[in-house]
Image (cartoon, grey):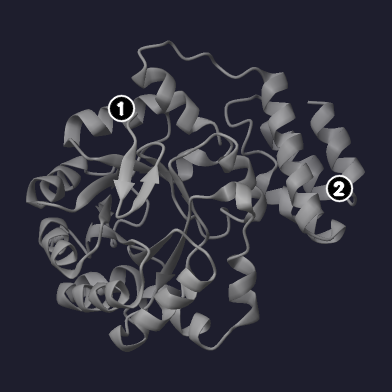
């Protein structure tokens, strides 16, 4: 682990937690913050929705002081509004604004946003340049290596982003065409790192354990890692990566520790949402914390049938 500067922002470590659509909500980020990753992100929001002051979008961007340093991530394909969107993120008190050029889902790419931007690398540079000109906080960018394997642009976009003024580029070692299937190709992250002069390159993709993070850093020489799905049910993964980097052995979390963590997560959900919505939310979160446990399916089915928070608590305590 090493402290790292992103522009003027000093982060305690080079282990960042990714914005995960439908997952990295307020409660998730409170859980994450307790384990001191270098930076955490809110879920991605659309530039257009920010500009038109969409209420739901601003709800996604709510955070508490204990979440700092925190980043807001935007997606879009219009350079003419990129600067204004970045300014809104800055005005909301975020420490970093990230430009998403990696989201592979159709509803995002259909207008050229997300990984749709990979088809026009120079447009990425134009958006970043306008964002950098509009704000004082650091601008970062997240990409996939390419739209498909016929066009791997990670190294080229790294140079473009660097010239446009981005402080960090995170490279997900998959193409848009892959979605989340198949292994991430860390060689593409390495190519981006080799192309970089001043911009810092973070690696992303297939970091599900602390050991994976160390392997990626060793294989690619990247400046840091952005952990995404590997944070689900293990908000402590940053702690575990630090443990390995100190040369110490990891200790497997006990069942009781996992139960306590899930109950804490539930507490944060209940604090932030009405009970009915909190019960529904636990259908998604409930089994993140017990991925290898026999009987997980039964627990999930029980949580799905629960009608109150007390029922959910009783199910967790009975595991």
- Report how far apart the C-alphas of labels 1 and 2 lie in the structure: 40 Å
Instruction: Say if 130 sits above or below 233 in the image.
Output: below
Residue 179, image quadrant? bottom left
Q: Secondary structure at mark 1?
A: helix
Quadrant position of the N terminus in the picture = top left
The answer to whether 72 appears left or right of 212 in the picture is: right
Task: Indicate the position of residue 279 as horizontal and vertical percent values.
Answer: 81, 53
Q: Residues within 10 Å of mark 1 (few under 14, many from 20)?
A: some
Task: Indicate the position of residue 318 as horizontal and vertical percent values.
Answer: 84, 26
Task: Indicate the position of residue 275 as horizontal and vertical percent values.
Answer: 86, 56
Residue at (49% x, 31% y) in the render:
237
The residue where tag 1 is placed is: 214
The residue where tag 2 is placed is: 306
The residue lying toward the viewer, choosing from 258 and 148, is 258
The residue lying toward the viewer, choosing from 296 and 33, is 33
Q: Secondary structure at mark 2?
A: loop
The answer to whether 307 appears left or right of 247 in the picture is: right
Task: Indicate the position of residue 241 as horizontal and vertical percent values.
Answer: 41, 26
The residue lying toward the viewer, choosing from 164 and 227, is 164
Residue 100, image quadrant? bottom left
Residue at (15% x, 76% y) in the render:
122
Residue at (11% x, 47% y) in the render:
191
Residue at (90% x, 42% y) in the render:
311
Instruction: Say if 273 sits above or below 15 in the image.
Output: below
Residues marked 1 and 2 touching at CB (< 8 Å): no
Does residue 295 appear in this view? Answer: no
Instruction: Say if 89 sits above or below 83 in the image.
Output: above
């Amino acid at each position: 682990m090493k402290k790292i500067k992103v522009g003027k922002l000093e982060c305690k470590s080079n282990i960042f937690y990714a914005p995960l659509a439908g997952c990295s909500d307020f409660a998730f980020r409170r859980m994450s913050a307790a384990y001191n990753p270098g930076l955490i992100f809110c879920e991605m929001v659309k530039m257009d929705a920010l500009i038109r002051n969409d209420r739901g979008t601003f709800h996604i961007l709510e955070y508490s002081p204990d979440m700092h340093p925190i980043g807001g991530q935007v997606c879009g394909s219009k350079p003419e509004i990129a600067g204004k969107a970045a300014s809104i993120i800055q005005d909301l008190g975020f420490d970093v604004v990230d430009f998403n050029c990696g989201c592979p889902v159709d509803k995002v790419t259909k207008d050229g946003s997300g990984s749709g931007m990979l088809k026009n690398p120079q447009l990425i540079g134009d958006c970043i340049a306008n964002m950098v000109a509009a704000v004082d906080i650091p601008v970062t960018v997240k990409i996939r290596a390419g739209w498909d394997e016929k066009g791997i642009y990670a190294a080229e976009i790294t140079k473009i982003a660097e010239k446009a003024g981005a402080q960090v580029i995170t490279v997900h070692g998959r193409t848009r065409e892959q979605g989340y299937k198949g292994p991430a190709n860390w060689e593409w992250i390495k190519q981006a790192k080799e192309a970089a002069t001043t911009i810092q390159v973070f690696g992303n993709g297939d970091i599900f354990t602390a050991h994976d993070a160390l392997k990626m850093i060793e294989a690619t020489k990247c400046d840091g890692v952005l952990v995404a799905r590997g944070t689900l049910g293990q908000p402590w993964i940053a702690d575990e990566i630090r443990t390995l980097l100190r040369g110490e052995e990891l200790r497997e979390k006990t069942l009781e520790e996992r139960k306590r963590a899930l109950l804490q997560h539930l507490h944060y959900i209940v604090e932030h949402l009405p009970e009915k919505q909190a019960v529904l939310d636990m259908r998604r979160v409930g089994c993140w914390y017990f991925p290898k446990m026999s009987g997980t399916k039964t627990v999930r089915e029980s949580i799905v049938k629960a009608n109150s928070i007390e029922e959910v608590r009783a199910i967790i305590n009975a595991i």
